[in-house]
Amino acid sequence: MTQELTITTERIDDFPLLLETMQRLGLPEMIDGHVKRHGRQQGLSWGWIGTIWLAHILTESNHRKLPVQGWVRQAGETIARITGQKVHELDFTDDRLTLLLRRLSQPAIWEAIERELGRNMLRVYELKAERVRLDATTLSGYHAGGEESLFQYGHSKDDPTLKQVKVMVAALDPLGLPLVTQVVPPVYWEAIRRTMGCMYQQWIVYCKS
């Protein structure tokens, strides 16, 4: 008898490389170390959900939650083989992603993950942490603004009709590798404090442009 073959076609783009890089950095374990799962929670851990979701954001250039479940459905076999995890699309429902966002939005949790990730990047790529540059910039968007919005710091110089948000980035020179990203308020000493937590040395060279 001739064996019947089942062929599954998946569009992979660049997300296998992204997932492998994030695994090399230990991102799933970092998130799991600071975002604990509920005792009755089934399926993927928060670390794997966050890592796979980030791969979707980067490969699709889309930060919305709604398309993630469908994307996982069509690429599930590839994701499972790369991660070694049992991947189910129900791990990426809008409700599940919202719960993860709420946990990551807590400053203490976010800063702990950011600090650990920064240290791991320096180790994995053997980068010399000799100088970090702090630069502030603005980003604009179609937002209403207001007290509850991040977009409350005036209007864009490029388009006065758009509200803007201020962002400060601490990047490792000369590579320009971001270590810390601080959204409003852009306070230099706060960014320096957070950057110091990512460094091995107890000093930092601060360059003011």
Image (cartoon, rainbow, N blue to C red):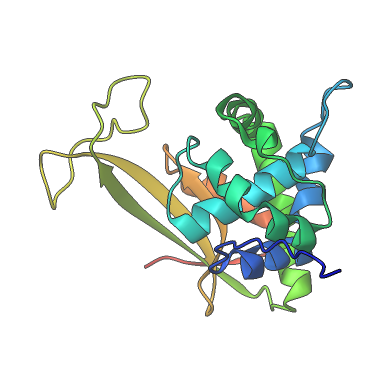
Residue displayed at 10% across by 42% down: 160
Residue 200: quarter of image? bottom right
Residue 203 in the image: x percent, y percent? Answer: 69, 64
Left or right placement of residue 37 versus residue 78 in this view = right
Reply above or below: 200 against 97.
Answer: below
Instruction: Answer left or right for 15 relative to 169.
Output: right
Question: Residue lying furthest right in this view?
Answer: 39
Q: Quadrant of the C terminus?
A: bottom left
**Horizontal arrangement in the rendering, residue 140 relative to residue 24 (left or right):** left
- Residue at the far front: name it: 1
User: How far across and how far down the image is residue 139, in percent?
Assistant: 30, 48
Which residue is at 17% across, 39% downward?
162
Asked whether 3 or 94 is in front, the reply is: 3
Q: Residue at (67%, 73%) from the top-left corner?
A: 129
* Above or below, 94 relative to 164: above
| Marker count (numbered) | 0
| Rendered image quadrant of residue 178 | bottom right
Place of residue 21 in the rendered image (x, y in percent of width and height, measured from the top left): 69, 68
> Percent from the top left, x then y, of residue 192?
57, 53
Lateral position of residue 148 relative to residue 142, left or right: right
Q: Residue furthest left?
A: 160
Viewer-proximal residue among 87 and 185? 87
Classify 155 as above or below 192: above
Residue 182 visible = yes
Q: Is residue 198 visible?
A: no
Q: Nearer the viewer, residue 22 or 183?
A: 22
**Quarter occupied by the N terminus:** bottom right
In the rendered view, would you say 208 is above or below 93? below
